[in-house]
Image (cartoon, helix red, strand yellow):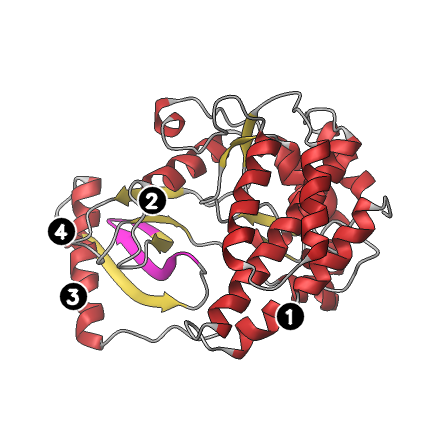
């Protein structure tokens, strides 16, 4: 993983001063009662910039992470939507960071951002599966993921703060049909070389697209890599920017995609549990009854989508847009997704 290049000292100091004034305004207190320290960029964050900072407001001390749109790649309303989602998730008992302030004003840090609680824990899935210190976590995580997902999907997608911002299937299409169209469009655009397995998968998916029992809230990227954990279990569910309205089974299928097992393929759920364990925990926590054929369909769709991700990463390398070894190696993993697609379509668990 690349390390974030630290900004110049004067630039960081100026940001800290602007952040101090912003916090004072948000809290309705004099600027001199606010102290900002330790502002620094964090490495990681594929679609957002992350800053760590400590803020004191009078006697109150806050350890925070600032989640920010990258300058030049601002998604209008994106920060406000994610802020509202975390508030809604917390009300449903989902383990998420507490959030504090949100602004679309780029004058403070150069782009829209919001502040959330800084939580101690680990988020690297390979360490979860490898390190002895997480042995207990491996035993409990599958059940916790099922229970948390049931709470996630109780979020009401229709309040004003969410309804106009969450993507939904086009009128007249089921979520499954819309997902196939979306992924196939990208596949046709980026796949220069032939991929007969993906052509077969497209036909398989179109012929079997399920009609959901309920259309509701979907996290959109629910996988082990977006979970913060410690030695006891789940600490927080992260990365809500792909949330949308669709078939809730989509989240279950995406969680079972092979790539998130990191070689521990005997356990389909992120290398830590079985599909049966996941479904039992999910339904036991109030999740809708899971149609197993629909779950299989969404797992196939997830691997198809991941194959497209690998293809686009390979194109970025081959076209010279981002000539990195990482993208080249990820491009080669298209074959892994294709192998998994063949197994799933043949009915091999």
Q: How many marks?
A: 4
* Label 2 residue SS: helix
Task: Find the magenta span and give its range.
Answer: 47-61
- Mark before the other along the chain sequence, 4 or 1: 4
- Mark before the other along the chain sequence, 3 or 2: 3
Q: Which residue is label 4 attached to?
A: 31
The CA distance from mark 3 to mark 1 is 44 Å
* Label 4 residue SS: helix
The CA distance from mark 4 to mark 3 is 15 Å
Q: Is residue 309 visible?
A: yes
Asked if the residue under mark 2 is in contact with the one under mark 3, i.e. CB atoms within 8 Å, the reply is no
The CA distance from mark 1 to mark 2 is 34 Å
Q: Residue at x 70, y 41 (%)?
A: 203
Q: Which residue is label 3 attached to?
A: 14
- Mark before the other along the chain sequence, 1 or 2: 2
Q: Is residue 274 visible?
A: no
Q: Nearer the viewer, residue 344 or 111?
A: 344
Q: Which residue is label 2 attached to?
A: 79
Question: Main SS of the magenta segment?
Answer: strand
x and y percentages locating residue 107 in the rendered image:
16, 54
Q: Which residue is label 1 attached to?
A: 332
x and y percentages locating residue 172 in the rendered image:
52, 21
The CA distance from mark 4 to mark 1 is 53 Å
Disc number lying in front (3 or 2): 2
Q: Residue at x 61, y 30 (%)?
A: 247
Left or right, 168 with respect to 300, comes to: left
Quadrant in the rendering for residue 281: top right
x and y percentages locating residue 12 in the rendered image:
22, 69
């Amino acid at each position: 993983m690349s390390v974030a290049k630290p900004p110049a000292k004067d630039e960081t100091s100026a940001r800290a001063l602007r952040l101090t004034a912003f916090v004072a305004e948000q809290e309705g207190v004099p600027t001199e009662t606010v102290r900002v320290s330790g502002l620094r960029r964090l490495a990681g964050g594929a679609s957002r910039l992350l800053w760590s900072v400590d803020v004191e407001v009078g006697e109150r001390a806050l350890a925070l992470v600032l989640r920010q749109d990258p300058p030049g790649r601002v998604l209008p309303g994106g920060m406000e939507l994610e802020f509202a989602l975390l508030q809604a998730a917390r009300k449903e008992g989902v383990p998420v960071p507490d959030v504090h302030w949100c602004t679309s004003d780029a004058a403070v840090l150069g782009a829209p951002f919001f502040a959330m609680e800084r939580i101690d824990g680990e988020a690297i899935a390979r360490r979860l599966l490898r390190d002895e210190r997480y042995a207990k976590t491996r035993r409990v995580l599958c059940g916790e993921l099922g229970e948390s997902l049931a709470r996630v999907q109780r979020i009401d997608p229709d309040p004003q703060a969410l309804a106009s911002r969450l993507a939904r299937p086009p009128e007249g299409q089921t979520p499954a049909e819309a997902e196939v169209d979306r992924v196939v469009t990208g596949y046709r655009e980026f796949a220069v070389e032939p991929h007969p397995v993906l052509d077969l998968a497209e036909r398989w998916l179109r012929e079997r697209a399920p009609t959901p029992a309920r259309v509701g809230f979907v996290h959109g990227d629910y996988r082990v890599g977006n979970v913060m954990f410690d030695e006891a279990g789940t600490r927080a569910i992260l990365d809500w920017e792909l949330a949308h309205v669709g078939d809730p089974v989509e989240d279950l299928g995406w969680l079972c995609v092979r790539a998130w097992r990191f070689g521990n393929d005997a356990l389909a759920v992120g290398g830590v549990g079985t599909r049966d364990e996941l479904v039992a925990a999910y339904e036991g926590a109030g999740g809708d009854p899971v149609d197993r054929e629909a779950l299989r369909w969404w797992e196939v769709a997830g691997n198809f989508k991941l194959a497209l991700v690998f293809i686009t990463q390979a194109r970025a390398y081959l076209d010279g847009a981002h000539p990195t070894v990482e993208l080249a190696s990820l491009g080669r993993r298209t074959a892994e997704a294709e192998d998994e697609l063949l197994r799933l379509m043949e009915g091999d668990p």
